[in-house]
Image (tube, rainbow, N blue to C red):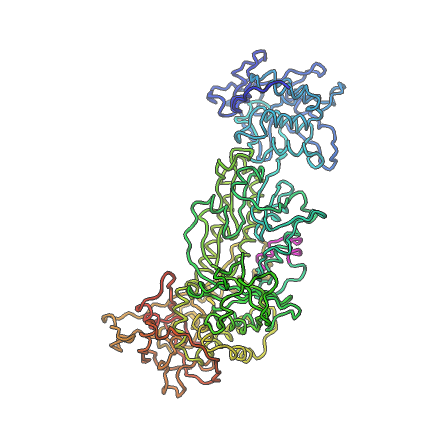
Amino acid sequence: MPSRVPSPSLSEQFYCNDSSSIYSMSSRRHLYDHSSMSSRSSTSQDCSRPNFSFPLPPSQPSTSSRARGLRSKPSKPTLTKTLSPPQPTSRSRTASFGKPRHHATPVVPAHDEIAFPVAYENAWGSRYESADGRTDLDRARIFITRFISMSSNPWVNAELRDVITNRELCRTVAHVAWAVMHRVFGNRHADFGVTPLVQAMRFILIKANIPAEVDVCEKARQVVDFFFDPTLHRNLEPLPCEELVVYKYPVGRLRVCIVGGGPTGLASAISLAEKGGGKIEVHVWERRWVRDERTGEVGYPPTARRRDQVVTLQDSVTDLLTPKSFQALFAGRPERVWPGSANIQIRKVEDRFLKRCQDHDLRGLIHLHAEGVTREELKNGKCGDFHVLLGTDGAASWVRRDYFRGYEKERGRSYALGLAFDRGSAGGLPWSQPLNMFLTLGQTRYLLNASDHDGKGYLNMQLTEDEWHKMVGIDGEPVHFGSPGCLRREDGSIPEGFTENRVFKPSEQRDSSLWKSIEDGLKLFGFKESEVINVVRIPIVVQAVREGVQQLPLEDSRFVRRPHALVAVAGDAAMTVHFWPGRGLNSGIKAGIAFGDELVHALNRGEFAGLPLSSMKHYNDFILKLQDREHDKRSIPILNQSGTPETLDWLLKQASSVPDNVAIDWLVGAMIQIADRLEQREDWYFKPEINVEAQIRIVLRQMHSLTLREMAVSFPWPTREMAGAEVLPCRSAKPEPPETSKKAEQKWLQQLWGIISKEPSAERRPRLPGSASGGSSGRFEAPRFTVPTLRSKSPSPKLRNGGFVDEKQRPPMPMGHPLMAQQGMGVGTASGSPPGSLRRCNASKRVGSVSSLPVPSEFGAAEAGAMGGRHRSVSVNTGAQGQEAGSDGGLTRLMSVKRQPNQKMLCEAMALALFGVGE
């Protein structure tokens, strides 16, 4: 092998300057130089004559270029008989070959076509017109020899001569191209432009039909992926001013590297493989996996820390999956719980998607790597070559941290406790799923997501700042997913897999307020302590990236075979949501499907040429729209209501002043209304529950008094604010059936008529305090709008001991919410009922104006600590006694999300309406 001379830059290597050619150098140079090679202006190009021609082989008769191009025959059949040989077409750059340029009608190849001068076709020759017996390898060697004779770069010429004369390197056309790829190009493209040598090698590969051999020859696959890289431009710029031969561009594979093998990463890989049509190769890296040496399959070891939460997957999301993936996800048995959705454990999503990735129809397209990858390892080439890097490595994503500098400031924070449970041989759930839903939606202190199929799931409880810091083991270390806590068995032993230090400390302090709250949460849904398998604390941070796609930094692109790559994020790496309203996994799967849709769409349209950020613009837009929907319409309403530690702490301090009967009747009323509304839905899966109120009262009766008050003041879910159209990947979304569209149109028309009618319905009309009209069906819900309170020209009221000096200046206060029904706040003698209770059966009766209700002087002392002690006693159900209530008030909710409410805010919260209570 000859000694290698230091290689000049690729931008200087491949222009043609052979003085022995029949045409001048100036007439050829502009045809084959990269745009950066020549400073010659395009206006100086002479297009009045053919610009380039290879000498014809002696064995072939001379014929015109136009005729030669039209009579070109396909090459011989290959081992892959299912693919037809390339079929060239002849196109002229001018109306007449000899006419001047100003009469030219330019022909621009399509994005999936590649054009060559017809002289290339002449130089290659046709075996059907000659009996010379030349093979494709012989023709390729002759073609390269002629290219050498026209190149002025001695280093490139030496390398090419050595390749075509070395028998080891010149066994097949694929071997020749592979040797050129490594010895001349160094297996890397210096830029995205096309050089004459690249175009010459492309022509050789197409004529030898090498793209049809990629499934049976690894070298063929490598050279096709390199020379037909989807990020390279298709043609020389400008195109030659002569007759062209156009072929279909056999685009190489696009490589995608996915960091993180959770549900979002696996959904992204499946979407790319299913829709890519063999043009996309996916590599997924996950450190929790292990590979079975016997079968070669990848899975989770028994010791792996898994996520036991049960999530609700919306039908609108799972309908985006292909039939095979949908069947793999639910194993033909989706568990219907919430309307329009199905429950499933996260670990089952991971297991089943992972199995789907290893199905026969996706093998060779998805490559699973049972090891993690860091940025340093990426820099050092562990992931090899790729075009796009996708970060799906969770909320603590290093991909997002290192490559997305504009990470948005968090929009809100909350704390939660998580109890994973497994009922084992008992199976199923203690209560029916409908009753579990009613108990969950009627308050926001506790949240249950569980599967009735196997009795597994997760019970969550929102925490205050003080409770968050108490979530530790006996050793004082926090309990979290990486190191969860446990509860002792009934005999005092430690569960298998835990140590003494990991015993949950509050469980050792049975009289503590935190443990009583946890204990009541288990009672609320009928679980036993022995069924709890671990305890963790969960930080909930609502935040997102400003952009979903960036360019990979140059310092991290040393092992990328082109100038740069793109990096994107999806799932929790792109946005984190408050999991009380959920949709975190739904958003991750939607983002993975959208990523596959937009990447395949850009690839098929040739938009990856040059690898610009604009090629992934549609995916970036989808991520931003998804953030707006999930944050502003789901997470923020929960945070505004009671989701922040400060707001929750203030509400729980006021809970001790709420009478037991008021708390119970408020909870029962809210839950019954929710049951009525859900059971009237067309997509309600279950039969109507019998004796719902009796069941709810039986469950609540066994709980501690203070827990009931805390549940009551936490408010029901703001379901109205969370309603609205879903953001879905438009390319995968399926059209609605005609009957569904017709129903939606009728509903829209009814809503429109209600808006434009002169007399709005009582349900839509805002009601002011003291109104005697009927109540809203959304009695226990957060409103969609805020009704302004009546303003007075009198000075602001003066406060004294938490009350108002001038009763006339006191703002009107609605009735209904437990905080409004403290001692002394009932209408008392006006109704003849005991004060401090709220009954569903009399909630719509007419009463006098609430402006006559006194404000308790004890409220002012509550913030100072009079209500701070949270003493618990077992609740006593007072039955159906209670005061009458019927007037609605202004619908203004407490919006404090940053700091603890001050005295003024407390009084305003008392004066304004948190919820309407009319019905």
Q: Position of residue 743 (x, y in %)?
A: 55, 63
In this image, 297 relative to 579: left or right? right
Q: How many marks?
A: 0
Front residue of 38/354: it is 354
Q: Assign the magenta stretch its main secondary structure.
A: helix
Magenta stretch contains residue 686: no
| Placement of 841 over or under 162, stated as above or below | below
Say which residue appears at 53% left-offset and 38% top-offset: 379
Front residue of 856/817: it is 856
Q: In terms of image quadrants, where is residue 657?
A: bottom left
Magenta stretch contains residue 322: yes
Front residue of 307/19: it is 307
- The answer to whether residue 272 of the structure is visible from this angle is yes
Q: In terms of image quadrants, where is residue 157?
A: top right
Residue range in magenta is 314-329
Front residue of 863/212: it is 863
Q: In terms of image quadrants, where is residue 465?
A: bottom left
Image quadrant containing the N terminus: top right
Q: Position of residue 236 (x, y in %)?
A: 55, 27
Q: Position of residue 318 (x, y in %)?
A: 60, 57
